[in-house]
Every structure is written in C-alpha cells, then in structure tokens.
Amino acid sequence: MAKWLSGLESMVGGGPGGPKRVKTFRLLLVIGCIGAALMLLNSFLKFDKVDTLTQGPNPPPQDTAASSNSISTDSSPFAAIEGPLENRLKEILEKIVGVGSVDVLVTIDSTEEIEVARTDQESQSITDETDRNGGKRHITAINKDGQVVIAEVAGDQKPIVTKTINPSIRGVLIVAKGAENQTVRRLIIDAVEKGVNVPANRISVAPSKQ
C-alpha cells in the first residue's frame, strides 16, 4: 500500500511545482477517505424520522379568554333561569296539535327577587315657624326606618322572607313547524301568554323551514 502511494506521489510530484501538487494530492486523498468512511457509517446506522409537528411535553397555551367567556356565560344567573324555562316551553308546545319540532329562546330582565320582613320605625317632628311678615308655617316631617328581621334556623341566622317575585321576562321567540297555520300560531301565543304570564306583544312566533 505504501509503495503504491509513493508511486502515485512520484507521478504527481514530477516537474516544476511538484511538492505543492503532492500536498494537494494528499489533502484530496484524506477528504476522499473521510467521505467513504461516512458513507459506510451511514449504511450501518438507522435513524428514526422525527415528526416536527408532534406536540411536545409542554403544549402551547390555549385561548383561555374564549373558554372563560363561555364558562361565565353558561354559568350566569340569567342562563340558569332561561335554560330550564326554554326546555319546559319546548316540551309543552310540541304537545299542541299541529305543532312539530320547536326551538325556544327566552330572555329575562332580572333574576328572582325576594322581600324580607323589617321592623317599622316611624318618627314624626312638627315645627311651627313665623316669618318677618307675620306669616306662619306648620311643618310636619315623618321619618320611616326599619331593620331586617332575622330568624335563627338550625344555628344559622337568616332573614325572614315575606315575598318572592318571579324573574321578569323581556321576550320569547319561538320557531316551530306548523306555525305558518294561523290557528296553530294563535294556540302557541295563547299557551305562552298564559303559561309564563307574558303579554302577546312580547311573544314572536315564526314558522321553521320544512
């Protein structure tokens, strides 16, 4: 092997500039050996393909604002009242003769209100005044005040509720199959008007697509 290399170097190094050509030849020979070694190494080794789209251990942050909005909307006190009322109206209206599938939307102005018992305290003051011209004025001032009556129930102190006011309904929208028939439409409006105590001008009924 050494004799073969020496022979090649003597052939390349002949003539003027020989030593420089010998150095270049040796450099090219080293580079070729390294390339051949890398090709052999690549044939023996196996590399697994890595999917760059695979989600790592730390997933990207999700849009928490949208999720929090949906949660807050679904769990609001208004939704807690409107949802069951819509389901109940849908269930009842679909039982009316001539009415098919129904979709109901209810909007309310306020949630349930309560009135509590209070102790009435009233004070009255009377004042007589005389002005410079001799005129007299009789002033009576009445002040009313009261405190909430508290009752103890099972060790807890709670106010005594005297009255419960149902939520105020702003309007009702109904989309129903069969509502194109005027008789069926009047039956739907009458049922909602009397069922949830909403005036007819706050009830909208529209026929759904066939």
Image (cartoon, helix red, strand yellow):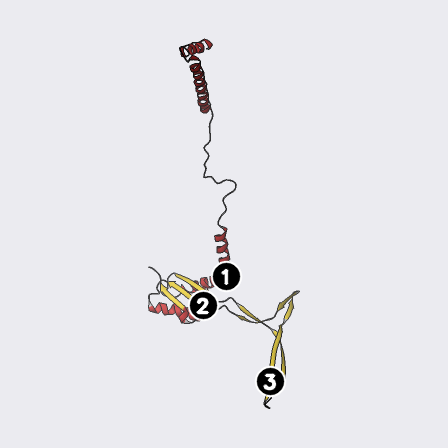
Q: Which residue is mark 2?
A: 170
Numbered disc 2: secondary structure: strand
Label 3's element?
Answer: strand
Mark 3, other Cα within 10 Å: few <14 / some 14–19 / many ≥20: few
**Mark 2 surroundings within 10 Å by alpha-carbon count, few (fewer than 14), some (14 through 19), many (20 or more):** some
Q: Quadrant of residue 181?
A: bottom left
- Point out residue 99 in the picture as x, y percentages from the top left corner: 37, 64
Separation of disc 3 and disc 1 at Cα?
51 Å
Horizontally, residue 104 falls left or right of residue 131, namely left
Q: Earlier in the sequence, mark 3 or mark 1?
A: 1
Amino acid bearing label 2: Arg
* Residue 100 picture location, percent across and down: 37, 62
- What's the CA distance linking mark 3 and mark 2? 44 Å
| First reached walking from the N terminus: tag 3 or tag 2 | 3
Query: Who is closer to the viewer here, 52 or 177?
Result: 52
Amino acid, disc 1:
Ala
User: Which residue in the protein does label 3 denote?
Assistant: 139
Q: Which residue is mark 1?
A: 80
Name the spot of residue 66 as percent of width and height, x first. 48, 53
Closer to the camera in the image, 183 or 129: 129
